[in-house]
Image (cartoon, rainbow, N blue to C red):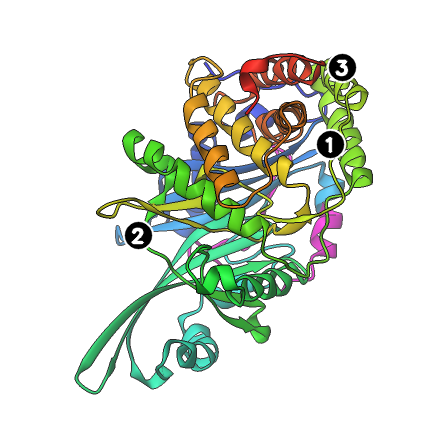
Amino acid sequence: MNPLPRDAVLPQLAVALDPAAMAEAFADVLRPHGVHVDACRVERVKYRPGRNATLAYLLSLRDGGSQAFEQHVAARLCAEGDAQRTVRASAAALGPSQAGPALHWLPALGMLTWWWPNDRKLRAPRAMCDPAVLREQVLPALMPALGAQAADVTACELAVVQYVPELRLCTRVDLSWRVGAEAHARRVYGKASREQHGAIAHGLLAQLQASPAWREGRLRTPRALLWHEPTETGWQEGLPGEPLLDAPAPLQAACAAALGAQLAALHATPTSTPRETTPEGLRERLEEVVRVLWPLLGSAPAAAAQALLATWPALGEDASTLHGDFHGRNILVEDRPGAPRVALIDLDGLCRGPAVLELGAWIADAIYRALLEDAPAGRDQVAWRELIAAYVDAGGAPPDPDTLRWAVAWQLLTQRAWRCVVNLKPGRYALAPRLIQLATDLAQPGAAAEFAC
């Protein structure tokens, strides 16, 4: 059972989110191209109630010779007139996909589809999927940062790690090369995002690695290698480890102290960034959340927002360097003898703001994941208290308990509940009302002391 919103403007939403139904729809599209659909997976959703939805699919396909391959498809639910305007407004040149189509309109679903590497707003996919571009344009600029030359490369394997239509792209490249008799291998990642966000993110990563904390090993983030202007891609060195959420439970628990120290080092590292979290920005965010969620969830988001406004804390004037998207998927853990080692990744949202919001984000994410697994909200309380204690021991400012509780409530509403609705991952939408109620309760004065640090 996967409850979904009922949207009068997008009645086809349930079909668009059904992998089996979409496998059939794409099979009809690909049949004239002699391509068979083995499976369809919904990878990404960006849903705006009463307006539109953008989706990302990954198709497992076979061609006429039974050669298996994968095909990314980006889709937008819209009226036919909107589709025609979107096609006219698309600045990217269209070319055929490996499966055949470049752009295809599905009238029964009101769905316009772009077939990889075509994207309405990103230029990088077309360059990144072309091995010739990688070898002839990127590697000559990238390899010197790795202590070699493009001519030394003996193998170059590229894979798409993450594709968010119209927004960002991350690819993994495994390189092998020889210098004389010595063989080398390295994993690097190429990242792109729309407009100039990618260049800014690459510059911020370079700022971090120039810091004393990075040089001394107190802060571990990927090493920035290259900003490649012709392809609008930023390149960074891969780090060992696995995402924290994929690690065994004992290893996750053992990482709390190391992660608290890493976070303290990040917060204390000065950066020059155009992005800053301000009280005005926070209030605008609150208004946006209420406006978007209201059509589906009624007055509950507004009640939570009012509780947050009524207990608005003094967040302080000193802005720390924040990760911007601090949760277990953006942390790598490496199981090493003695103690695990952690690293912070996916720092594209790096900004300046109140450190307590990031601590609140960690607790809110832990509560969300506990509820998702039908566990008590405070299941991971021991781990998050250990993280905060290590954060303070490493020089982070001790958070005021009431302010921290408010920050948890803020993140439950504006991040966790918000994403349950706008991303529509299986089982998440039904959890949104409970998260919103918990945010409302936590925002009350003196509420839920057990969630204080």
Task: Identify whether 441 is placed above or below 20.
Answer: above
Is residue 282 something one can see in this rendering? yes
Residue underneath mark 3: 303
From the image, state whether disc 3 or disc 2 is nearer to you. 3
Picture coordinates of residue 360 (x, y %)? 59, 31
Picture coordinates of residue 9 (x, y %)? 72, 25
- Start and end of the magenta stretch? 84-112
Residue type marked 1: Arg
Residue underneath mark 2: 64
- Whichever of labels 3 and 2 marks the residue nearer the N terminus, that label is 2
Picture coordinates of residue 170 (x, y %)? 48, 56
Picture coordinates of residue 125 (x, y %)? 52, 61
Choose between 380 and 79: the one closer to the eye.
380
Question: In the figure, residue 109 lies in which quadrant?
Answer: top right
- Whichever of labels 3 and 1 marks the residue nearer the N terminus, that label is 1
What crowding class fits label 2: few (fewer than 14 Cα within 10 Å), some (14-19), or many (20 or more)? few
Residue type marked 2: Gly
Question: In the figure, residue 92 lies in which quadrant?
Answer: bottom right
What crowding class fits label 3: few (fewer than 14 Cα within 10 Å), some (14-19), or many (20 or more)? some
Tell me, yes or no, whether the highlighted magenta stretch contains residue 182. Answer: no
Residue at image point 38% right, 39% down: 244
- Whichever of labels 2 and 1 marks the residue nearer the N terminus, that label is 1
Q: Disc count in the image? A: 3
- Decide if residue 373 is on the left or right side of residue 251: right
The circle drawn on residue 51 is: 1
Assign a secondary structure to mark 3.
Answer: helix
Real-space Cα separation, disc 3 to disc 1, in angstroms = 23 Å
Residue at image point 68% right, 41% down: 354
